Image (cartoon, coloured by chain):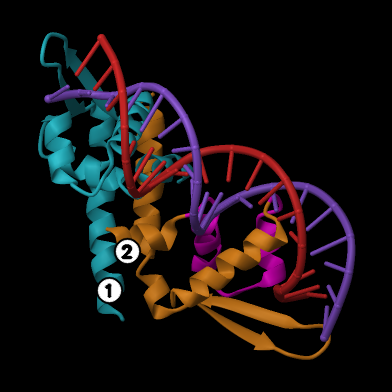
Chain colours: A orange, B cyan, C purple, D red
Amino acid sequence: MEVALAAVAGRWTTLLLRDLMHGPRSYHQLRDGLPSLSDKVLADRLRQLVAQGLVDRQQQRGFPNRSLYSLTAAGEHIRPLLIELYRTGQRLQQSQ
Amino acid sequence: MEVALAAVAGRWTTLLLRDLMHGPRSYHQLRDGLPSLSDKVLADRLRQLVAQGLVDRQQQRGFPNRSLYSLTAAGEHIRPLLIELYRTGQRLQQSQ
DNA sequence: CGGTATCCACGACGATACTG
DNA sequence: CAGTATCGTCGTGGATACCG
């Protein structure tokens, strides 16, 4: 359980993973999807997810730079957990 | 999702909830179940869970004191999430 | 027995400025 | 475009000691 919790921990991690569930995204697309997230935290979270092996980063050098982030096979394992987080959140809010 | 995540966030929260899933527990029983958890953090987590409405605290005054902690109906809503956390953890570890 | 009171360490998060 | 650098704030967690 600690492994799974570490994978989704952090205020923004689930939101990033949710975006990536819909397909590969550039840094720019991810930032646009979460406007209130600073560059620093976005870069931190992405580096963490790559280090955990949940996300893959493809860097195309040149000018301007481009990077494409996508889920790895391991990252796909998180999908049912995100769904259950959503459902549980719904249940908790309804019961209040 | 943030609501559900807040409910299970923290290094020890899921472990406490898992114990309480099996039935009401006294402070002493919970501490014995998690020997490496300090009194401060245990009391902090329990207070947080009570404040969130996930756990109920019944205090029997006298000497010595006794307190009994149990899940509320809302707390029961967390059960499927804990199961999914366990399963996802298994999948992530197998894929490494 | 069931906690509080302190104090401290560490990492997550945030704001702002800057760069290859 | 896709980040890094720097600095500051806050919450979680840990250690130890004490209390009704």
The structure residue drawn at horizontal position 50% and vertical position 70%, both measured from the top left corner, is A49
Q: Please count the marks in the image.
A: 2
Q: Is residue B90 visible?
A: yes
The image shows residue B15 at horizontal and vertical percentages of: 24, 47
Q: Is residue A3 magenta?
A: no
Taking depth in this image into account, of B51 and A14 the one nearest to the observer is B51
Amino acid type for the residue under numbered disc 1: Gln
The structure residue drawn at horizontal position 40% and vertical position 38%, both measured from the top left corner, is A90
Circle 1 is placed at which residue position? Answer: B93
Horizontally, is A38 left or right of A56 in the view? right
The image shows residue C4 at horizontal and vertical percentages of: 36, 22
Q: Quadrant of residue D5?
A: bottom right
Let me know if marks 2 and 1 both belong to one chain.
no
- Under circle 2, the secondary element is helix
The image shows residue A59 at horizontal and vertical percentages of: 66, 86
Amino acid type for the residue under numbered disc 2: Val
Taking depth in this image into account, of A87 and B76 the one nearest to the observer is B76
Between the C-alphas of marks 2 and 1, the distance is 8 Å
- Under circle 1, the secondary element is helix
The correct choice, above or below, for A4 with respect to C5 in the image is below
The structure residue drawn at horizontal position 19% and vertical position 26%, both measured from the top left corner, is B69
Horizontally, is A26 left or right of B70 in the view? right
Taking depth in this image into account, of C11 and B78 the one nearest to the observer is C11
Q: Chain of mark 1?
A: B
Please state the extent of the stretch shown in magenta in the rendering: A10-36
Q: Is residue A25 magenta?
A: yes
Circle 2 is placed at which residue position? Answer: A3
Proximity of marks 2 and 1: CB atoms separated by less than 8 Å = yes
The structure residue drawn at horizontal position 26% and vertical position 56%, both measured from the top left corner, is B84
